Image (cartoon, rainbow, N blue to C red):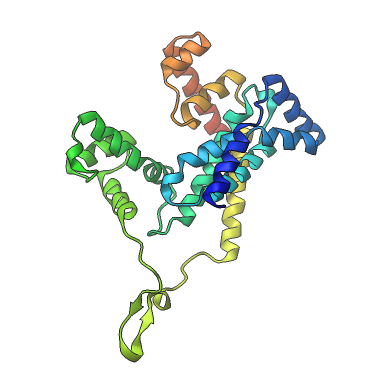
Amino acid sequence: MSQDDHRQYIQKVRQLNTLSLEEEYQLAKDWREKQDIKAMTKLAEAHLKLVAKVAVGYRGYGLPISDLIAEGNIGMMQAMKHYEPDRGFRFSTYAMWWIKASMQDYILHTWSLVKIGTTAAQKKLFFSLKKTKREIINQTGDNTQNDQLTAELVQKIATKLNVSEEEVWSMEQRIGGKDASLHTPVGDGERTAEWMDWLADESDNQEIQLVQRDEMDKRRQAFNKAMTALNAREQQILVSRRLEEPPKTLEEISQKLDISRERVRQLEFAAFEKLKKGLQHSRL
């Protein structure tokens, strides 16, 4: 997709009508209970602008926006398979997690640097390092660093993102590194070769990849099943505090639900414990 095509697509999806709560609920019910393809299509089209908006937020990783949108649409369709409209929250709130997860997985697997770990902390560091670094520099008012890491800056980033300083240094080196062509000549004369000739394929075979995908599907199913043990308010709080980016503050939620911040904290803790027990039960 060219730049012009991309702009035309963004303009087109922005013109799509937003569904009312009642319309969204009925379409989701028709899709879930009747497998109504027309309802599913209309629900998906109404949220294409959400996928495009999220994709634009990841444009700084050097990947085509069209690819990110395609991955986001896949994530949205996965969300649609598991969405339960009777749980009481909007589809956009539920689908956001799936859309971002799909795009982030694509970015991590496509990123042309040294293999990056996929733990929650490492993924958070990968996607938050640049933004956090700039925020801290702007807060201190010291723009003379030119985005260069210092020991003090690394300490602040590690504290804010809850990772070790060594992980911050390592990720900065990976993200800031220069890509080299695999066709770069190595040697001279008759012994000239390319870097590609010296690389071994260390990726998992298809059987292992299939097992990994199956395991991921099982984890997602277990998560969705565990979420059903929570009531609507607990789900709303847990989603707002743990799954949305950026997460809502206790004050924001307390005002929305008209309860105290301490009560929100208690409900969040209780909901998270329920979720953990549900996931543990699924593993057993």
User: Could you say which is closer to the camera, residue 112 or residue 247?
Assistant: 112
Q: Residue at x 51, y 38 (%)?
A: 54
User: Could you say which is closer to the camera, residue 205 or residue 270?
Assistant: 205
Q: Give percent across and percent down for residue 14.
A: 59, 33
- Residue most extreme to the front: 4
User: Could you say which is closer to the camera, residue 116 or residue 56?
Assistant: 56
Residue 25 drawn above or below residue 182: above
Residue 197 drawn above or below residue 237: below
- Is residue 284 visible in this depiction of the protein? no
Quadrant of the rendered image containing residue 20: top right
Quadrant of the rendered image containing residue 44: top right
Report whether 150 appears left or right of 208: left
Q: Give percent across and percent down for residue 27.
A: 75, 29
User: Could you say which is closer to the camera, residue 264 or residue 103?
Assistant: 103
Residue 88 drawn above or below residue 80: above
Report whether 215 appears left or right of 104: right
Q: Give percent across and percent down for residue 132.
A: 32, 37
Report whether 151 appears left or right of 127: left
Report whether 180 appears left or right of 57: left
Q: Give percent across and percent down for residue 17.
A: 66, 27
- Is residue 149 visible in this depiction of the protein? yes
Residue 81 drawn above or below residue 65: above
Quadrant housing the C terminus: top right
Q: Residue at x 42, y 78 (%)?
A: 197
- Residue most extreme to the bottom: 190
Q: Residue at x 53, y 42 (%)?
A: 101
- Please tell me how many numbered marks the rendered image carries: 0
